[in-house]
Amino acid sequence: MPPTSKVAPSTNYKQMDSVREVSDFEKWSSEDVADFFENKGLGEYRELLVHHRITGKVAPQLTDADLKDMGIKIVGDRCRFRHILKTFGRKARQVQRNKIVWSGEERVFFGCADWCVGSCGGLCPVDPSTYRLTNNHLKIRLVDPVRVGPVRLCCCAQFSVNNIDLSQVDDVDIEGIPAPFVQQCFCCADGKEIIEVSTAEGDVPVIVRMGEATAVADMIMNQVEESQMIERD
């Protein structure tokens, strides 16, 4: 089906390029910030930006009073600075929101024995659920495979994507599941750990390798606390 609009894709690409332009702004030196504003037509203030040590972390916080204190006396130029800084701050916040704190895959099998059975010796590749934690959201792509007995088929699987707002998370719990005794004895199979992320809509599982859950749960809780603090402010 042809696209209904020829403008939207171009607009999206421009937005992506625009965000990518400030993707590593926190690492910018004052020279980098000066280069950025020079590209925006404000190169005459390059020395001022460098002299006042305006780095990538400082730039989004500049106010009109700060610009005056720096010696930018022309009202029109201060207005241009404020407009660029407002846009810069919006892009910077978007970068921060989408910054990946942790990503991982579902621990599907305990060890080689149930992998061999469950994937039919590798003939049916496994499509695990995936997890991505950002500063504000936990994105879970939950795969519901079609099975023939214990075998997960490599086709016809259904999946759903759950974007959990971390400010709405109530609790994060951990449950350990040991590997079956026979697999532990003969295959040295590891267990699994389930991180239960509780929200008002129910619990969402994050299944990881044994020994990983504590670190992952701590990262989730840290981002939950940050998100809830921002929500209160």
Image (tube, grey):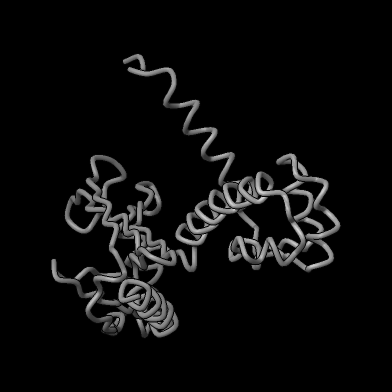
Residue plotted at (38% across, 46% down) = 123
Q: Pinpoint residue 145: horizontal percent, then vertical percent.
A: 23, 51
Q: Position of residue 172 (x, y in %)?
A: 28, 81
Q: Is residue 162 above or below residue 9?
A: below
Q: Is residue 218 above or below residue 20?
A: below
Q: Is residue 137 left or right of residue 32?
A: left
Where residue 30 appears, as percent x and y from the top left, is: 78, 62
Q: How many marks?
A: 0
For residue 226, what is the image quadrant?
bottom left
Name the quarter where the C terminus is drawn: bottom left
Query: What residue sits 63% from the left and 45% below the top?
Result: 80
- The residue lying furthest to the left in this view is 201
- 45 sits left or right of 5 in the view: right
Q: Nearer the viewer, residue 65 or 17?
A: 65
Q: Please state, as top left, top right, bottom left or bottom right, where the N terminus lies in the image.
A: top left
Res. 188 in view: no
